[in-house]
Amino acid sequence: MEAAGTCEIARLPVELLAAALALTTPRDACRAAAVSRDFLAAADSDAVWSRFQPRHLPPLADGELSGPAPPSEKGQFRDRRILLADGLMSMWLDRETGAKCYMLSARALHISFGGTPEYWRWTRLPESRLRFTEIAKLRNVWWLEIRGRIHSKMLSQDSTYAAYIVFKTYRDGGLDYPPQEASMTTAGGKSTRKVCLQRRGNEQEDGRAS
């Protein structure tokens, strides 16, 4: 037997529930789906998830919309990466907020001495979820500088963003010392801090020296 509160909710039209949930966030809609069958029907409806879709999307690469489409508007939030027009950036929607997220390929970055074979080697990348065809492999360099930029108009409003660098290292990568300098620059200023791209060999997972 359902609780009294649930019975009262069941009297409301699903369309009304959907209209209310459309004013929340993807995370709230997923939580509401667990309340009752009526909430589930409303929370999973295209009427709700279409409201979470960004109004303005950057130009996409040719053929990105020609493949199998998600079965529902909600399916757009399942970490489905799509390539942008230049093929050097990919985009997806955050599952919790609906904000636009981006990844820049190695070719979209400015890598000091990136065009010098003595220091960097560009390798073809097999089909992967990252959607890019090339990666840059560091061979030998005395100056490591990588810069990337993205136009603020491409970002979602009223959203907090974080920037990450995705890379893979070997045990003898030589990036454990000295610490590297990472900075983030926006119209409001610049933030700089020291980071370590590779854990030292005598450190444990929590960063303590063994």
Image (cartoon, rainbow, N blue to C red):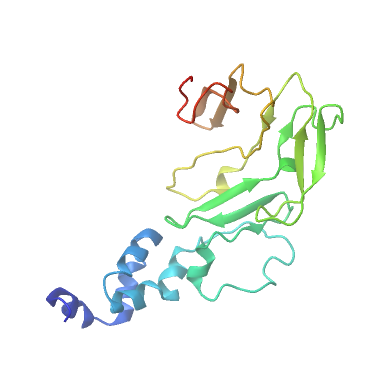
| 4, above or below 119, in the image | below
Q: Residue at x 75, y 18 (%)?
A: 142
> Quick check: 16 left or right of 151?
left
Residue 129 x, y percent position in the rendering: 65, 56
Q: Residue at x 27, y 75 (%)?
A: 36
Q: Residue furthest right?
A: 117
90 and 30: which is toward the camera = 30
108 and 185: which is toward the camera = 108
For residue 200, what is the image quadrant? top right
Q: Residue furthest top?
A: 178
Q: Residue at x 84, y 32 (%)?
A: 115
> Quick check: 187 left or right of 122?
left
| 127, above or below 109, in the image | below
92 and 36: which is toward the camera = 36
For residue 61, what is the image quadrant? bottom right
> Quick check: 95 left or right of 65?
left
Q: Is residue 25 at least partly visible in the picture?
A: no
Quadrant where the N terminus lies? bottom left
Residue 141 x, y percent position in the rendering: 77, 22
Residue 197 x, y percent position in the rendering: 60, 28
Residue 24 x, y percent position in the rendering: 34, 61
